[in-house]
Amino acid sequence: MKQLCMTLTALMMSSLLWATPTKVSVNFGGFSLDNKATIRLRDTSIRYTQSIDENRTAHFDIDVDEPTYCSLSIGSSRNQIYIVPGKDMLIKLVNDPEDKVHKSYNLIKLNLEFEGGDVKMNKYLQDFTYTTIADSCFLLPEKEYIDLVEKTIAQDAKAIKKFKLSKEQETL
C-alpha cells in the first residue's frame, strides 16, 4: 500500500513538471495556393510543419515554457505570431480587405484573425508590420528612396503613438 501511494505521488508530481503543449490551429479557409503551414520559434532552429486536414486546418502542438514570438509561414508569406503557454489559439486566413472584387490574399503577409491565446498582442503584430529599408533600396532613384524613408518614419511615429503594451509585454 505504501509503495502504491509513493508511485501515485511520483506520477502526479511528474505530470505537473511536464507542460501540456499549446494547441495552435491554422484554418486556411478559401486559401488554396498551399496546403501546409510551418511555425518556427524565434531565436531557435525548432520548426513545426503540418499539412491541412479535410477541414482545411493545420493543427500544431507547440512546446513552449514562456510566451514566445514565432514565425508562421505559408507558401511565400511570413507572419509573426505570439504564443502563450497553455493558451490554445485558432488562426484564420482571411481575404485581403482592400480587394473587395476578387477576394484575393496578400501573399507576402497574409491577413489573419485570431481566437484564443493573446489576441491583443497577435492583432498588434498583424497590424504593425513595418516597411523596412533593405540594402538594395540604396540603388533606387533618389526620389523613390526619399519617399521610402519618409514612409518608414511616418509609420514608426504612427505606431508609437497608437499602441501601448502592457507592463508584462514591455518586459519580454
Image (cartoon, grey):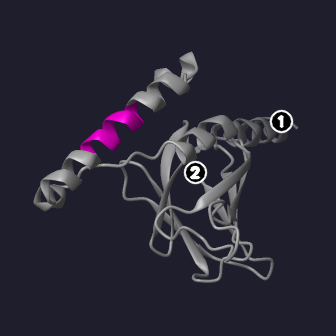
**Residue 122 inside the magenta-drawn segment:** no
Instruction: Give the side of residue 86 with respect to residue 141, left or right.
Output: right
How far across and how far down the image is residue 112, in percent? 64, 56
| Element marked by disc 1 | helix
Secondary structure of residue under mark 2: loop
Q: Is residue 164 left or right of residue 87?
A: left
The relative height of residue 74 versus residue 17 in the rendered view (above or below) is: below
Task: Kindly identify the residue that appears in the image at 74 percent across and 43 percent down.
Answer: 11
Percent x, y of residue 60: 65, 63
Residue at the image point whose x is 74% and y is 79% from the top = 53
List the residue tagged with mark 1. 5
The numbered dot on residue 63 is 2
Image quadrant containing the N terminus? top right
Give the Cα separation between the discs numbered 2 and 1.
Answer: 30 Å
Which is nearer the eye, 34 or 7?
Answer: 34
For the stretch drawn in magenta, what is the main secondary structure? helix
